[in-house]
Amino acid sequence: PRPWRGVVEEYRSWLPVGPETPVITLGEGGTPLVTSGWLSELTGCDVRIKVEGTNPTGSFKDRGMTVAVSKAAEAGVKLVVCASTGNTSASAAAYASRAGMQPVVLVPEGRIAQGKLAQAIVHGARLVQVRGNFDDCLKLARGLAEEYPVVLVNSANRDGFRLAGQKTAAFEVVDVLGDAPDLHLLPVGNAGNITAYWAGYGEYAAAGHATRRPRMWGFQAAGAAPIVAGAPVEDPETVATAIRVGNPARWEEAVAALEESSGRIDAIPDEEILAAQARLAARDGIFVEPASAVGVAGLLRSHAAGLVDPGQGVVITVTGHGLKDVDTALAAAGDLVKLVVPPDPDAAARALELR
Ligand code: F0G
């Protein structure tokens, strides 16, 4: 087996790059598709988890960022800007710095997980906290990119470079399974990823690499569910800060993906998100950030509502690593982290109630 070369080299003919494009890569993509024993048993389906937290900066954003920053490098760009709930900023900071560009990241003040804040800083980003939410950050980023010599690397950007890179996740699923699954579940925030997966499945099927396309099931956090509600949410609120988005940039494309795939979209309360995060970590050994557990919570909720027929092939994308947001995980753990014993086997055994 040859080493994985990153999504641009692995899927070059499917991407908007040419021989003159300098490839800025950290070896992203090629992420594991892990069988979930308990979810498979529960639903009677073959449930696989696409673990995107294993990407270089810990989220699926790296797939799109390698393409966006490579194209920016090709164009001779010096400054890139993005709005972010945290993961895009971490990824943009890493890739832009690697390319010798200055990243500028706009994040909602006080509302991004600490790990992501640290990533932006260590990778050399100019970090600007904005008094407002993600939607305000995106407006500001667009305004800056229009008026000043900075290039926007959000997936909202109409050049489509980010989404082109992100669609490679669908290619990988098909390459591993030999065909598209029946159902694909994932969290929805700004709605770029569901749009990208749908494009990827469509292109692969059109080229004969798959015989079908999956039904797309998207899930938003209940406090930030504009697509479910059919109207923008003024003050989105959820523990899943990564998807705290009130007015998704790719709203229409997401709705098209849902309609064309005979899919559905639903809202998940925060308690169910945290419960799914905890169970995925404890049962499958996969630690994801809260937003990333939304697809798993969605499968549990859909199963409870009798909506999941057994015998299907199901893929759930978990989008980002749990280490990005340890504060939330520790808050949920409560007293579980407070057991302290002296360095004495008998005392430890007593505290652990062994035998
Ligand atoms: N999961 C995680 C961990 C995310 O960071 C995001 C989006 C999503 C899911 C939703 O993906 O926006 O394509 O529908 N994070 C963006 C950011 C908004 O700024 O990092 P989407």
Image (cartoon, helix red, strand yellow):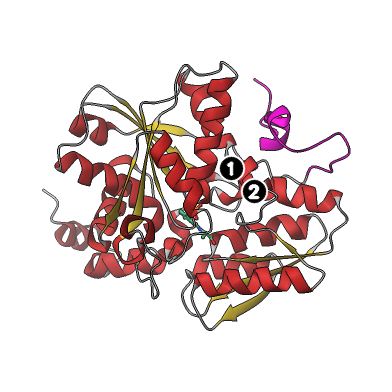
Label 1 neighbourhood size at 10 Å, few (<14), some (14-19), many (20+)?
many
* Image location (x, y in percent) of residue 318: 42, 46
Q: Which quadrant of the structure image shows residue 239?
A: bottom left
Res. 6 visible in picture: no
Q: Residue at x 56, y 65 (%)?
A: 84
Q: Which residues are magenta?
A: 1-23
User: Are the residues at dot 2 and dot 1 in contact (C-beta closer than 8 Å)?
Assistant: yes
Q: Does the magenta stretch mainly form a helix, a strand or a loop?
A: loop
Point out which mark residue 166 bears: 1
342 displayed left or right of 98:
left
Residue toward you, 260 or 277: 260
Q: Residue at x 88, y 56 (%)?
A: 76
Instruction: Give the SS element for disc 1.
Output: helix
Badge 2 is on which residue? 162
* Image location (x, y in percent) of residue 285: 35, 43
Residue 18 counted in the magenta span: yes
308 displayed left or right of 197:
left
Quarter holding the N terminus?
top right
Indicate if the residue with disc 1 has its beta carbon within 8 Å of ligand 1: yes
Label 2 neighbourhood size at 10 Å, few (<14), some (14-19), many (20+)?
many
Q: Amino acid at mark 1?
A: Gln
Res. 36 visible in picture: yes
Q: Residue at x 74, y 38 (%)?
A: 16
9 displayed left or right of 217:
right
146 vs 203: above or below: below
Q: Amino acid at mark 2?
A: Arg
